[in-house]
Every structure is written in C-alpha cells, then in structure tokens.
Amino acid sequence: MRIVKIIVIVLLVAFVGIQFIPTTRNQSETVPQSDFMQVHRVPEAIQEKLQTSCYDCHSNNTQYPWYNKIQPVAWFLEDHIKEGKAELNFNEWDSLSSRRKASKLRSIIKQIESGEMPLDSYTIIHKDAEFSEEEAENMINWITRLKDSL
Amino acid sequence: MKNLKMGIAAILLLAVSFTNAQEKEKKDHDHGAMKMDHGKMMSQNSDAKAEIILSDYFNLKDALVGDDTKKAAQMGTKLVASFKTFDKASYTKEQQEALADIIEDATEHAEHISESAIDHQREHFKILSKDVADMVAITGTKNKLYQQFCPMYDKGSAWLSTSSEVRNPYYGSKMLKCGKVQKEISN
C-alpha cells in the first residue's frame, strides 16, 4: 500500500510538473490571402468539411478542445500539427506553383480515398471529422474537378 | 485513501487552470521553409547531373517493375540526394525557375517513395514520372528514351524507359507487359 502511494504521488508530481513546460500553440486570428478558400471558390459544404476535418492540422489555426491543452496530450498533438503543416498548409496554398498544387490535390484525393486521412487518432475524438461515404465522394469529385481545371 | 482522492482531484484542477492560463501566449508559423541548396558550384556539366537523376529514376522504375519495395525505397532516397546536387546555373532564368519547381515537386515524391509501401510508391511514381519527363524536356539527355503508357493504371499513366520493350512499373508481375510506347524522346 505504501509503495503504491509513493508511486501515485511521484506520478502526480511528474504530471503536474510537465504542465509547466510551455508548448507552441498553433493559433492565428487572421486568414491570409494565400488561403485555399480565398484562392478558389469553394462550395459551402466543402468548406465546412475541410475546416472540421483538415484545418486543425493543415492550417495555422487549430481549434483546441480543452483536453488538448493538457500534457502529454498537447505534445503528441503538437507533433502531428507540425508534420501536417509541413506536408500541406491550406493557409499558404497560393504560395505553391500549379505543379505543386496539382500534386497536393492528387495526394489529398488519394488520402481520402484510402481513408488514411483524417487520421484515426484524430477521428476517434473528433467524430464529426470523419467522412461519410457521401461526403468523401463529394469531396473527391470536387477536388478532382479543381485539379483538372488548374 | 479519501484524502488521496481529494488530493488528486485538487491537483488535476490546478493543472487544468495552469494550462488554460498558458494558452494566452501563442506563437506559430514555422513552416519548414524551402530548403534549396544546390551542391557546390561545379563546372557547367549540368547534363551529367541530369543523367544521374535519370539513372536513379530508371533504377527506381526497374525496382517497381520487379515489385521490390525495399529497392524502390532506396532509390527514392538516392533520388532525393541527386535532385539536391542538381546544378541549374547553366540554364536561362526561365528554365531555372521551371527546374526549381520541377525539382521541388519531384523531391517530395521521391521522399514519399523512400518511406512508403508499394501501392503508395507507385502513386508517387506516376507524378514523379511527369516531373522527370518535364525535366528532360529542358535538360535533354544523351540517351534515347521511350515514353510508355498504361491506360489501366489510375485512368492512364505514363513513365519513361530506356528500352522500347514495355515492362510495367505500375503493376509489376501482375501485368508486366501492359502498355505501349507513346513516343520517343531523343536529342
């Protein structure tokens, strides 16, 4: 019993301790001119879906739920966002050349088609980020048309 | 025991409020700025650099023809390095811009190829093939190349080969000879 108590206390101290380590928050109030939705005319339903399912990790602005402000969850998340933005940042869409845009759009289609994105670790909490079959189809069709029009 | 529980609850509450307070400060934006270093300035032999890229590309293609994921991944890594050392200096300004664009795109696809399963590798190989073909259109090559085409893979996909014989990199052993020569490239 004693040993359990000690372990619990140590863990608690560690848990509290790591809360003081500052993290970088991925938040921004402005949407730049180069944003995907500023550059293209995006239908509302598609906009909403992109916003809920993609923008948390693929833009400069994440909608953080409260539990994502607690370590070590926050670290885990920070890592994902960093990686996600390096791969694709919708806010900086227009800085890409047409070739790069076409490449990215193609990847987006493949990722949704194969169900790799949004990540399972994300949709397990963000149920609304999941794509229904219909949503996936609409998204893929729309992005395909955009890609072909570039 | 009860005390302990209360203690845990209190500490949790404390932790949450601290993180909320922290939230005020927000920083952002380190979007891995474009890294573009093109080796050291060598003699004007940029063609040789392009030939190295082509030879890596053909090795990659052969690996995919042979359904060899591991080899394909290695060639992906090799390609990334070869793209990096490509020297644009001897080209016109416009060509340099086009080449920079092509290489940035191609590098990304090569990176993905270096770390993916074979299906993914083939997806990326398709776009990489277009990039490499566009590069050759600018740099030229000393060898005669064949652009081949498979109408079945992803609504039709092309690739380059040094041989007129069709060996399909998109299907490998499943459909080794599917495809045809679309055009010959030489200069």
Image (tube, coloured by chain):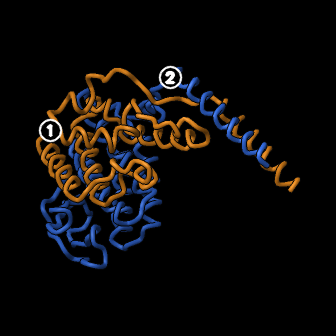
Chain colours: A orange, B blue
A22 relative to B45, above or below: above
Q: Position of residue A33 (x, y in %)?
A: 26, 22
| Crowding near the residue tagged with mark 1, few <14, some 14–19, many ≥20 C-alpha atoms within 10 Å | few
Q: Are marks 1 and 2 on the same chain?
A: no
At label 1, the amino acid type is: Pro
Q: Residue at x 32, y 54 (%)?
A: A111
Mark 1 → mark 2, Cα distance in angstroms? 31 Å
**One can see residue B96 in this view:** no
A91 relative to B75, above or below: above
Read off the chain for label 1.
Answer: A
| Crowding near the residue tagged with mark 2, few <14, some 14–19, many ≥20 C-alpha atoms within 10 Å | few
Q: Nearer the viewer, residue B85 or A15?
A: A15
Read off the chain for label 2.
Answer: B
Q: Looking at the rendering, which quadrant does residue B49 occupy?
A: top left
A87 relative to B177, above or below: above
The residue that mark 2 highlights is B26
Q: Residue at x 15, y 43 (%)?
A: A146
Q: On the rendered structure, is B184 left or right of B71?
A: left
The residue that mark 1 highlights is A43
Q: Residue at x 67, y 29 (%)?
A: A20
